[in-house]
Image (cartoon, rainbow, N blue to C red):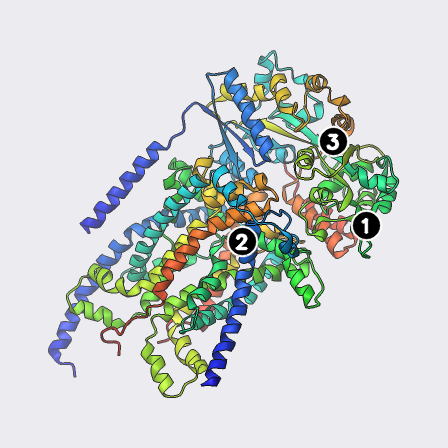
Amino acid sequence: MRAIKIQKIILLTILSLVAMVYLGPFIFSVIVSFSDNKNLINQPGQIVNSGWTLRNYIYIWKDLPFATWLFNSVIITVCQTITNVFFSALAGFTFAKLEFRGKNLIFGAMMASLMIPGIILIIPKFMLINELRMINSYPGLILPGMVSVVNIFLMKQFFETMPKDLEKAALIDGCNYFQMFWKVFIPNSKPALAAVAIYTFQGTWNEFLWPLIATNTGEMFTLPVGMASLRYELLTDWPAIMAGTILVSIPTLLIFVIFQRYFVQGIASTGGKE
Amino acid sequence: MVSGDELNIKMKKNNSTKKEQQFWAYTFLFFPLMLLTIFLFIPILFSFIISFFDWELMAAHQKFAGLNNYVEIFRDKIFYKAMLNTVLYTIGVVPIQTMLALFLAFVMNQKIRGRSFFRTAFYIPAVTSSVVTSIIFVAIYSKEGLLNSLLGNLGIQANDWLTNPKTALISIMMLNIWTTSGYFMVSFLAGLQNIPDSLYEAAKLEGATQRQQFWHITVPMVRPVTYFVVVMSLIGCFQVFDQVFVMSDGGPNNATTTMSYYVYQNGFRYFRLGYGAAAAIVLAGIIMTVTVIQKKYFPPNPY
Amino acid sequence: MVKNTLKYILLASSLALITSCVKDKANTIRFSSWQSNPSEKRLTDSLLHCFVIRYPEYKVKFELIPGNYSEKIQLMLGTHSAPQVFYIKDFVAPSYLRYDVLQPLDEYIDKDTTFDKDDFYPQFLNAFTKNGKIYGLPKDFGCFVLFYNEDMFKATGLSDPPKDWAELEEFSRKLTKDTNGDGKIDQYGIVIEPSIDKLIPFVFQNMGSFQDKDGNLTLNTPEFQGALEYYYGLYKKNIAIIPSEVSMNNTEEVFGRKRAAMVISGGWFVPQLKDQYKDVNYKVAYLPKGKQMATIAFTVSYSSPKENPLKEESWKLLSYLTGKEGMKVWTSTGIAMPTRKSVAAQLDYINHPEYKFFMGSVDFAKIFQVDYNERWYSITQSAMQAIFYEKADIPQKLKQMENDIKSLRIKN
């Protein structure tokens, strides 16, 4: 009994140390964001001497167009997350469970497209959106990211781990493939869907390069672009910069905390597995 | 024993389901593929085409250059330096990141006190935008920054991690592992949910230790996800850009110039889009080769 | 299936609706600049406001470009979506002039009798001139001068700034000291950085140059090498510090936080000193003389794209901003120096205790532009970093630099 207890304590200690490494920089930036010492970031030892203030957060929220940027980020991210979850599940299911002509070719092309560094695609995408007159507008920011190969790939791999009996059972019950998808596979894929939701939300929320290029005016900036536009305004006002970046990070963190409960549920014993 | 009648029914079902499958497949894929074609495949095609031109964005007419861009790439010292950096980066990061992510997910899947807290803690680096973590780490890696303070307590001499050509790349690698191990932990966690508890229970009854359970149950069962993580990891490493852009601008002396950064530099900073596109295509070719080799020796579905 | 199709149609039509609502007003002049400090932004806003009051029939939209300005402008010029008026830095002007994307302004200048182009200091206008045509109007200028900490000088028994290279070295040596007795040097004579931008004034002072009149490289010359060896020598002799070694981002910060007694910087540093480093008792002086007096001047132009539906309107804005009235408003705050002789005379900057060093430098200030593809900058940066961080051999690096940059010549 005691041996197991000691093992548990050791494990917890190791985990806590590792967690410290992971959390350390983040905690440091939180501390800096509440500090009124602008040089704290270069002199971490000064923590004990510095004062605390909410000033930085108030400044970010009130004096800067933070609310506008937040609104834009929310709209774009929510849209893209919903479409990604739906379409990647649909497409992932298609590649995992259906046979059709051109399947390998299309999937191969999609995987190949992942190899191209995204940087170089920015220009042609800009030209396209420009032709469609969607620069500096919501469609221009949302459309290109509505579907992503990575998410389709993830869902495909996930569906492939699901037992084949589910499929057979559904067919025997007389389902067509859409019903099978919607009524059988989706309900059992909550962990993977949660993963896609988290990845997409985070990816879109933090996206910098495309919103930077595709917007012209401050009203259309998303949060990362807005924060970047303050680089000279804030210069070395590290506490304010940290406050801003932490505010920007909070939503993605919340999404993770909310969705992670899906990782706790395992697949209850499904019919036919045992 | 399958009777003749049952076989006939099965065959009929197979034939009709084939057409049915095709119908549904095309229906399901219509919208996503259309979007992908417009915003992904067409831009890729565009990049491929301009790689054969001396394509400069502001020029009135573009000159056809044939294979000149490609030839020039293979003659460029910095291209090889970028390739070397990228390879080193990938070899260092991918294995560590994957194993760490799987290990963390495995541990997080156990019933441990404070599990939710730890899970969130490990994921936090992944949550913050890379631009932000890069800024934080520039401060931490600097000569009077946090890292040196901590190391100083252990008696290790202070070093300017990012301006020392020998440590610059490793510093960025550490940063990447720190950020993305939690990110991939999420994928593994999702995959781990699919492993039935009964397998673990049966193993425990037969006296298997945690370690044996990990290697003989978890690792094999989670293989498709591992494949996903390794591939995404490889691709991510080969395309590493953000951190270099913010932290070191490819320096010092090209010590941190990665292939993606090389593409950016030449395509944007030097106004030579055609050349940048050619570099991107070459990079894609290299990644593709590596992935194909990896698929051969590490297939996702051996069963 | 039907449900899906309907969904698609709905989505497409709503998208079309949204797009049609987001349209810019057709005759609004779009004006762009890069990120700058808040006081400069406020001044820009008020200047544009003055313009709109003066000419109420025009509307101006100020589109600030965050991030990498040059790349965005390039992209917009290449896709015919550029703003009507925008900034161009003198340093990158050759890259834009290489292409036929900017509007030549001569016909407008000649038609406008009040514009008076001869009022400009020649080198600033020339920075944006190609083949006799003017493509940009310089809005202001700055140049490198020497900032020094008067308190540190007095404490070391020095009353005047260094006049030449010998004094610069001697003073730096005297000013480098351990101020708190802990055995480590906390104050350095001067702060420099391993970049070509800060080196090039020394090269000019040493009668050297980056390229000659015909555009051939002159890096592998005794003059260039001499300047580089002097410059690096300051660091090697431990009387000059570089920012990364004290965990700071730039030379201005090192000076502002009192780790160095001297720094080479420009007018842009003054607002920062007044704002952030109020306790630094600074003074301005000409750069020390090498074999001759020389410094680098920086200017920014307002330019217009060739593809422009609002040419007349753009000219109105351009001519206002760089006209005698607009320039006076802009430069009267001292944010930068006027490029017009008449405005400089009006503001009497030549007699201003601080600004006189900027105005006085005009006589020997050069604009630094090169005729090579932008990659030359990375090559020199790598070389400088190798010299400073890896103690690379200077003559060898110079030869290598010249070799590598030679092939990047921009063909005209």
On the image, the x and y values in percent for residue B128 come to 49, 54
On the image, the x and y values in percent for residue C323 come to 61, 18
The quadrant the N terminus of chain B occupies is: bottom left
Q: Secondary structure at mark 3?
A: strand
Determine which of the numbered discs, if any, sits on residue C366 in the image: 3
**Discs 2 and 1 lie in a common subunit:** no
Q: Secondary structure at mark 1?
A: loop
Amino acid type, callout 1: Thr
Amino acid type, callout 3: Lys
The Cα atoms of the two marked residues, 1 and 3, are separated by 38 Å
Horizontal side of residue C271 vs A135, given as left or right: right
* Residue shown at the point (56%, 29%) measured from the top left: C42
Tell me where residue B218 sits by quadrant: bottom left
| Residue furthest left in the image | B5
Above/below status of C407 relative to C295: below
The Cα atoms of the two marked residues, 2 and 1, are separated by 34 Å
On the image, the x and y values in percent for residue B282 come to 52, 55
Q: Which residue is mark 2?
A: A30
The quadrant the C terminus of chain B occupies is: bottom left
